[in-house]
Image (cartoon, helix red, strand yellow):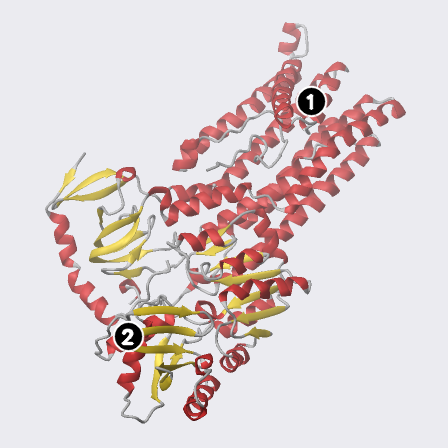
């Protein structure tokens, strides 16, 4: 292994000035919030796809891992080899010389070869599924055509089926490359710091706590925190952000992202499959196996459709006395287009979304999002920036009480709380230069606030419920102040010491500038009801709701009650989507038809809790996700109704009338399957928007990449 030393510390030293400048200009940063299966088209996606025309299509792990053009070319060559041999026998048959030399039609060899390959694959899949599969239709048709000595027709049918399969695989590989490309983001080696030197090691050997050097132009191999240096990191592979983000000491970085400028040392926190990139790859793979209702219905239909076609062919033959008509029905009716209709669209959608920083967990999620007509938005962090700040500290007691006294009491009481409002209060106290002692005891009171004991005093910081039991004289001034600030849209808290109101603190959480447009966009794409949930008081919630044009709001909602609101809308007949932070909102996300968590990069709980996880907190992604789901749902319906059922029915009608030969049936069958795949492939290039288009280069923590300046 190569040992690199000497110049790397200099790379870090060169960036210290920029790091210091970045620290000075950036605002305080809130704490970070923060299945294996290759797509196995064994003709079948493992979605009960009985498309067993003869290839086992076990796509090589090497191709999935490297995405190399050579690997895909080799797969193409393998897929096209057998159709090429059959085509050669047909050409020799038409030329005639070889047939005269051998004394039999050489196309018989092509027919037998194709039939054996298809029948072998059919037998394997039929045994695995323990039921009649669609490959039986083609197998019987080939045998019947050979028996009546129409060898060229049999060879052409086998050729069309296998060539069509090869075309499908090529298109499906293009779809899979969108997902396989995720694997290429993970570097294979890392620069491990050993003493004062750096050693290049396999990334699998890196352990949490190790120090890793990320040089300019290199990919970050782990999830971790910057401990030294300054760099601009391209996070588009994880969050979808198009502009690099400045990273200094204490900032989080993610595996698979690229240092476009500068060098940093990173402490590894998550490695391998535990990184955000590893989770993305796992979830995308699992999502391919998560079948929606449309796919399940198609599977059920295909189960009884094959015996039905056999029965129809068995009736047409004796009624018409023409075995070729029966053969044509068997060939054209093979339901390959039907079983391809849903999984191809789902895989294309998932791959497209994953490349843009959105994790979609399978077919059921695509269908659910495509049909959702009501949406619930958690206010904090979704409609607001999620970074509350102290706007006012008021004195409500004239007994030698100062604003600093009120703030110090509140900060001491909130010192052990992790709530965003608590952090805002303690941060404001630190900004004012106050030394805040930790409380002797601390209690979180649901629906009220916090209660603590410090230096013998019981301090309560909470909403107006905290005034229950306070004497009328003491409560009146506090009630009036609370009402005034709530009407202005603030979250207003009262601070009590031993039951006596000391003062009040007004908290502001800025509504996102794009929130009103976001709500209108949700309505434009078809949501009939847009509801906001908040723990704020009714007055503050009403002001935000009116400003954003919401249809409804629920105020003073406890985290445990959010799921009940979702269930209430569902009981009214709505198909409900819920957007939250994925942690406190986990029960509501699970109850909703579609749960969406925002800004979850590096957050295990959030990624696992949601059906859809947005790696960044860009609101513009949300309408884009629903547009993608609606388009995918529409494409699935087109695939099933037009390219599968309608074409099949028309083909069977003409075949039964003797107007479609076995060769023509093979053409129609393959055209339908290819149209399904090409139609689904349109989703690969779908642009969700949002994080791809922050034209000003701004980021959620207020920074701007130096490359954007």
What number of labels is visible? 2
As rendered, which of 256 and 509 lies closer to the eye?
Answer: 509
Question: Relative to residue 397, is residue 75 drawn left or right?
Answer: right
Residue 132's x, y, as percent? 70, 27
Q: Which residue is drawn at 62% across and 69% down?
A: 529
Q: Is residue 144 above or below residue 398?
A: above
Q: Name the residue under label 2.
A: 454
Q: Nearer the viewer, residue 1 or 336?
A: 1
Query: Looking at the picture, does residue 637 appear above or below residue 552?
Result: above
Furthest toward the front, the residue is 456
User: Which residue does the image show at 12% across and 48% down from the upper left?
Assistant: 7
**Horizontal side of residue 702 vs 463, given as left or right:** left
Near mark 2 (Cα within 10 A), the count class, few <14, some 14-19 or many ≥20, is: some
Q: Residue at x 15, y 49 (%)?
A: 8
**Horizontal and vertical percent position of residue 500:** 37, 86
Find residue 691 and report its image quarter: bottom left
Answer yes or no: is residue 279 visible.
Answer: yes
| Residue 233 % position (x, y) | 30, 56
For marks 1 and 2, give the one nearer the viewer: 2
Q: Earlier in the sequence, mark 1 or mark 2?
A: 1
Residue 73 in the image, given as x and y percentages of width and height = 45, 31
Camera-nearest residue between 111 and 528: 528
Mark 2 element type: strand
Q: Is mark 1 on a helix, strand or loop?
A: helix
Up/down of 663 relative to 367, above or below = above
Q: Residue 182 carries which label?
A: none
Write down the residue under mark 1. Answer: 139
């Amino acid at each position: 292994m190569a040992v690199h030393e000497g110049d790397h510390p200099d790379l870090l030293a060169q960036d210290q000035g920029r790091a210091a400048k970045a620290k000075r200009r950036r605002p305080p940063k809130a704490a970070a919030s923060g299945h294996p299966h290759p797509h196995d088209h064994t003709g079948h996606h493992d979605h009960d796809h009985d498309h067993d025309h003869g290839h086992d299509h076990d796509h090589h792990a090497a191709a999935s891992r490297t995405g190399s053009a050579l690997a895909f070319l080799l797969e193409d060559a393998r897929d096209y080899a057998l159709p090429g041999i059959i085509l050669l026998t047909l050409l020799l048959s038409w030329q005639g010389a070889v047939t005269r030399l051998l004394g039999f039609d050489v196309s018989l060899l092509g027919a037998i070869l194709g039939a054996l390959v298809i029948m072998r694959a059919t037998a394997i899949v039929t045994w695995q599924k323990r039921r009649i599969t669609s490959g039986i239709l083609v197998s019987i048709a080939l045998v019947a055509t050979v028996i009546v000595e129409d060898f060229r027709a049999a060879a052409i049918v086998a050729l069309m089926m296998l060539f069509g399969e090869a075309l499908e695989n090529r298109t499906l590989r293009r779809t899979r490359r969108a997902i396989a490309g995720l694997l290429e983001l993970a570097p294979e080696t890392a620069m491990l710091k050993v003493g004062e030197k750096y050693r290049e090691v396999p990334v699998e050997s890196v352990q949490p706590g190790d120090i890793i050097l990320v040089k300019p132009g290199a990919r970050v191999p782990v999830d971790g925190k910057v401990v030294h240096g300054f760099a601009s990191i391209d996070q588009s592979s994880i969050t979808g952000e198009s502009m690099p983000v400045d990273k200094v000491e204490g900032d989080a970085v993610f595996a698979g992202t690229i240092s476009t400028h500068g060098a940093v040392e990173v402490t590894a926190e998550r490695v391998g499959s535990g990184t955000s990139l590893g989770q993305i790859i796992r979830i995308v793979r699992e999502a391919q196996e998560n079948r929606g209702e449309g796919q399940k219905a198609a599977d059920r239909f295909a189960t009884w459709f094959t015996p039905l076609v056999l029965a129809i062919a068995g009736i047409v033959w004796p009624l018409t006395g023409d075995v070729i008509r029966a053969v044509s029905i068997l060939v054209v009716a093979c339901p390959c287009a039907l079983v391809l209709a849903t999984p191809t669209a789902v895989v294309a959608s998932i791959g497209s979304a994953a490349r843009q920083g959105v994790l979609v967990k399978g077919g059921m999620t695509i269908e659910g999002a495509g049909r959702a007509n009501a949406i619930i938005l958690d206010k904090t962090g979704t409609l607001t920036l999620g970074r509350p700040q102290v706007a006012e500290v008021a004195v409500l007691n004239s007994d030698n009480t100062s604003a600093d006294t009120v703030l110090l009491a509140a900060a001491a009481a909130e010192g052990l709380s992790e709530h965003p409002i608590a952090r805002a209060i303690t941060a404001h106290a630190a900004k004012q230069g106050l030394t805040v002692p930790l409380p002797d005891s601390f209690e979180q009171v649901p629906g009220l606030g916090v209660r603590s004991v410090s230096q013998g005093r019981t301090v309560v910081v909470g909403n107006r419920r905290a005034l229950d039991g306070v004497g009328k004289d003491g409560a009146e001034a506090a009630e009036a102040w609370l009402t005034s600030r709530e009407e202005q849209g603030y979250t207003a808290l009262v601070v009590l010491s031993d039951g006596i109101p000391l003062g009040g603190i007004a908290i502001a959480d800025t509504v996102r500038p794009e929130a009103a447009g976001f709500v209108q966009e949700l309505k434009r794409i078809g949501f009939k009801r847009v509801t906001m949930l908040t723990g704020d008081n009714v007055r503050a919630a009403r002001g935000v709701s009116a400003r954003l044009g919401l249809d409804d709001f629920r105020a003073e909602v406890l985290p445990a009650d959010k799921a009940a609101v979702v269930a209430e809308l569902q009981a009214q007949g709505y198909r409900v989507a819920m957007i939250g932070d994925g942690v406190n909102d986990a029960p509501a996300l699970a109850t909703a038809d579609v749960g969406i968590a925002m800004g979850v990069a590096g957050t295990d709980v959030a990624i696992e809790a949601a059906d859809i996880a947005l790696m960044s907190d860009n609101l513009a992604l949300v309408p884009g996700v629903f547009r993608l789901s609606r388009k995918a749902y529409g494409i699935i319906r087109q695939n099933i109704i037009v390219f599968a059922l309608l074409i099949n029915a028309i083909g069977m009608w003409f075949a039964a009338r003797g107007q479609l030969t076995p060769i023509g049936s093979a053409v129609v069958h393959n055209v339908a399957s290819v149209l399904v795949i090409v139609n689904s492939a349109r989703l690969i290039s779908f642009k969700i928007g949002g994080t791809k288009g922050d034209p000003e280069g701004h980021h959620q923590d207020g920074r701007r990449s130096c490359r954007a300046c």
